[in-house]
Image (tube, rainbow, N blue to C red):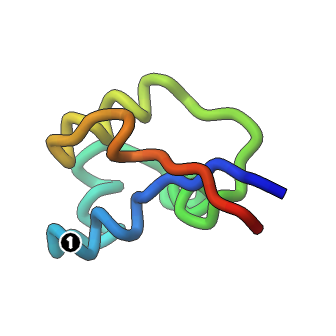
Amino acid sequence: MEYLHIRIIELLQEQGISKTKICRDLDFQRRNFNRYCRDDFQRVDANMIIKLCHYFHCTVGDLFEIRNS
């Protein structure tokens, strides 16, 4: 079965940024942010995606990928 993966962890590691820092910088609740990091979501918040793209200097296509479970 396929699922949508948000490459947050990979981008954080590539850029040497901690979860604490990004949550503080973007005013995200850590609990909700961790759910996105685990791909544990049903819907994606468009405003959050825009903030992440600006923060990582990436496109929406760089942020998402489809994976097989």
Residue 69, percent across and down? 76, 68
Up/down of 47 relative to 55, above or below: above
Q: Residue at x 15, y 42 (%)?
A: 57
Q: In the rendered image, which residue does mark 1 sit on?
A: 14
Q: Residues within 10 Å of mark 1 (few under 14, many from 20)?
A: few
Instruction: Say whether residue 13 is left or right of residue 9.
Output: left
Q: Looking at numbered disc 1 in the image, what kind of residue is underneath it?
A: Glu
Label 1 SS: helix
25, 46: nearer the viewer = 46
Up/down of 34 relative to 5, above or below: below
Quadrant of the image for the N terminus? Answer: bottom right
Instruction: Say whether residue 52 is left or right of residue 35.
Output: left
17, 29: nearer the viewer = 17
Residue 19, percent across and down? 35, 68
Instruction: Say whether residue 28 is left or right of residue 68.
Output: left
47, 67: nearer the viewer = 67
Q: Residue at x 22, y 49 (%)?
A: 25
Q: Residue at x 71, y 63 (%)?
A: 68
Q: Residue at x 62, y 66 (%)?
A: 38
Up/down of 65 relative to 10, above or below: above
